Amino acid sequence: MLLFCVFLLVVATSVQASSRYRYSNGYFVQGNRNLLIPTTNPLRMGLVEGKSWQHVHDKIDERQRNGVHMKLIVFLRHGEGTHNVAIEKYGSEAWNSYYCKLPEYLDAPLTDKGVKQAEETSKKLNAEIGNGLLLQHVLVSPLERALRTSIIAYQNQTTKLSIKSIELPREVLGVDTCDKRRNISEKKLEYREVDFSGFESNEDPWWTPDYRESDVELEIRATKFLDFIFSNSSAKSIGVVSHSVFGAALLRVVGHREYSLGTAELLPLLIENLPESKL
C-alpha cells in the first residue's frame, strides 16, 4: 500500500512537472502570488490595477509573434446545483457514504438560486465584454448544471459565440450520481444552441458506480483538455463552463496557485503552451 501511494505521488508530481502548459502571472489577482488571494468574485474579473483586456490580448499576440502559443481561458464554474444543497444539508460524510449514490441526484440540475447566480454572471460577462474582453468560442461540460449555466451566462452572446459540449471538462468521474450525465439525445432536444457533434456515445461511457477518479487521473484529463484546446481551436480566447474539482486540477497542471471557485464564479486564465526547448 505504501509503495502504491508513493507511485501515485510520483505520477502526480510528474504530471505537473512535465506539463507544457504554464500560467502567465501578472494580469489577474487570483493567480498573482505577489498579492493576497482575493475574496470571491473580484471586480473586473480580477484584472490587476493598471491592466486592461487590451493588455491581455496584446500579450497573447506578442507571445504568438515569438513562437509561443498562448490562450485566454475564461473558466466559469456552474451555478449552485441540487447536489451542492444536499452536501450542505447532510454534511460531506453522509453525502459520501449514502446520499451521493441516490438516483434523485442524477446529473444534478441547477437550483433556483443557481439560475439567479448564472444570470448575475451574465451581467458581469456583458460588462467585461463591453470593456474589451474578446471571446471567440465556448466549451462546456455535458452535465446539466454546466449546460444550463452556459446558456444563461452567455444568453446575450449566442449570436456571436459558438457553444460546443465535450466530455473532457466534466467533474470527477464515478460513484456520485450527480456526476453521471443523461443521454446526449435528451440534451440535444433541450439545448439546441449547443453543438454535441463530437460525442461518440449517447449513454455515459465514462461514469462507473464503483470507482471514483483519482486526483492523478483528473490532472491527466485536465492536461488532455488543454491539448484539445491548443490543438483543435484557432481561437485565442475561449470560455469554459465546468466544475470546481476539475477546475482545481486544471490550476495544478498549469502552476496556478490554489484558488477556491465559488458557484457561478468566473476565473480568467492566461495560459501558454511552451515548446520543449523552453521547458
Image: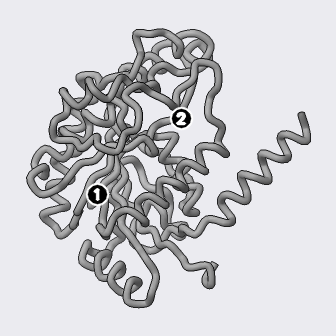
Total residue callouts: 2
Q: Residue furthest front?
A: 200
Among the 4 quarters of the image, the one containing residue 47:
bottom left
Tell me residue 231's x, y (percent): 43, 65
**Which of the marked residues, 1 or 2, is nearer the chain's N terminus?**
1
- The vertical placement of 47 against 104, above or below, is below
Q: CA distance from mark 1 to mark 2?
A: 29 Å
- The vertical placement of 163 against 149, above or below, is below
Q: Which residue carries the number 1 mark?
A: 43
- As shown in the figure, which amino acid type bears the numbered disc 1? Leu
Q: Residues within 10 Å of mark 1 (few under 14, many from 20)?
A: few
Q: Residue at x 61, y 83 (%)?
A: 278
- The vertical placement of 263 against 144, above or below, is below
- As shown in the figure, which amino acid type bears the numbered disc 2? Val
Q: Is residue 51 left or right of residue 215?
A: left
Q: Do residues under tags 1 and 2 come within 8 Å of each other at their CB atoms?
A: no
Tell me residue 189's x, y (percent): 18, 27
Q: Which residue carries the number 2 mark?
A: 172
Secondary structure at numbered mark 2: loop
